[in-house]
Image (cartoon, grey):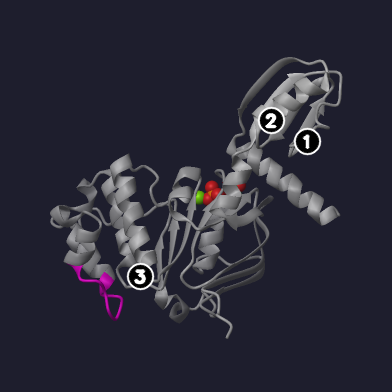
Amino acid sequence: MSTRPAVSVVGVTRRFGDVVALDDVSLDIAPGELVGILGPNGAGKSTLLSIVCGQRKPDSGTVRLEGGDPRVAATRRGLGLTPQETGLPPTLKVGEVVDFVGRHYPDPVPVAELLGEFGLADLADRQTGGLSGGQKRRLAVALALAGRPRVILLDEPTTGLDVGGRHALWDAIRRYHAAGGTVLLTSHYLEEVQALAERVVVVDRGRVVADDTMAGILSQVGLRRVTLTSPHDVAALPGVTRAERAGDAHEVFTPDADAYVRALVRSGLEFTGIEVRGATLEEAFGQMVDAQTTEVAS
Ligand code: ADP
Ligand code: MG
C-alpha cells in the first residue's frame, strides 16, 4: 500500500522579478514526518511555505497538500499555519482570538486547553496588543493548532523567543508530532532544527542542497576547516572531504583535523601558519552544493 504524501512539491520554481526565490524544488513529506527546512536568510524558505499553503502560486511545477490543490479552500481544512510574521488584532483578548479562530473549524481544541498547552492560560484576558514579542509568537503557534490540523507549517516559529519560551514551544511541537501530526518548519538556526527534526532539508539560494537525516546533516556540518600555507599539494592526503587552493594558501575540510595534521606532518611536506576551526554552516552548505554539482556532472 502506498501512502499519499502529506505534502508534495514537484519541480517548483518561483521568481520575484529578477530574483529566483525557488529554483526547481522538489520535496515529498510523508504523513507524520517532522521536517526542518534549514537555510540562511533569503534562501527561499518562506516562499516555499507560502506555496505549500496556497498563498502563492508557483511559476512552474506542482504542489499538493494531502493530495489536493492548496489554492482550493477545502484542501486547506486539515492545515494549520504560523507565518513568519503574524498580525494579531491588538484590542482582542488572547482568549477571544483563540475562540474566534477555533470557530472556523468543526472540532476545535477547547480554548482553555490550548492556552494551557502554550503556557498562556494566565493571559487569557490580556489584549494581544499588550503581549510581549515572545508571548505573541507562542499565541501565533497555538492558533495554528486550534483546528486540530493534520499538517502544520511553522515559519521560523521561535524567532525572538527567549530560551524558556523556545523550549516550551519546542515541547508543544513535539507533543503535536508525537500524536501523529505532520510538521514542516523553517529555521535559520541549526540548533532549532537539530532539537526537533528527524529529517532536514537544506535550502540555499532557492535550491535544495541537501535532504538527509539529522545525523547525515550533522556529519557534514561537523567538518573541521584547516588553513595553511604551502607550495605543495597538501590536499592529497587521506581524510580530506574538500579543499580549495589560491596560490600557496590552502583551505582543507576534514571530519578529523587531528588525523589530518598527523598525516601532514608524516608526509614531510613543508607548511606554515596552520589553523584549525569548525566549518560554519555556510561552508558546509557550500560543501553540499559542490557535492551535488559533482554528482550531477558525473
Ligand atoms: P527566507 O524565508 O529563506 O529568508 P524568502 O522566501 O523570504 O527567504 O525569500 C527568498 C528570496 O525571494 C529573497 O531574495 C527575497 O528577497 C525574495 N522575495 C521574497 N518575497 C518577495 C516579494 N514579495 N517580492 C520580491 N522579492 C521577494
Ligand atoms: Mg523567511
**Which residues are the magenta region?**
102-111
Disc 2 residue type (three-letter): Ala
Which residue occupies 28% across, 43% down?
A: 164
Kindly identify which residue carries mark 3: 179
Left or right, 14 with reference to 214: right
Residue 269 seen anywhere in this rendered image of the structure: yes
Quadrant (top left, top right, bottom left, bottom right) of the N terminus = bottom right
Left or right, 171 with reference to 240: left
Q: CA distance from mark 2 to mark 3?
A: 45 Å
Label 2 SS: helix
CB under 8 Å between discs 1 and 2: yes
Left or right, 71 with reference to 174: right
Q: Is residue 133 above or below residue 46?
A: above
Which residue occupies 44% across, 50% down?
A: 156
Which residue is situated farthest in the bottom direction here? 1
Give the x, y percent position of residue 200: 55, 55
Which circle marks residue 259 in the picture?
2
Disc 1 residue type (three-letter): Pro
Label 3 SS: loop
Which residue occupies 65% across, 43% down?
A: 285
Q: Earlier in the sequence, mark 1 or mark 2?
A: 1
Kindly identify which residue carries mark 1: 238
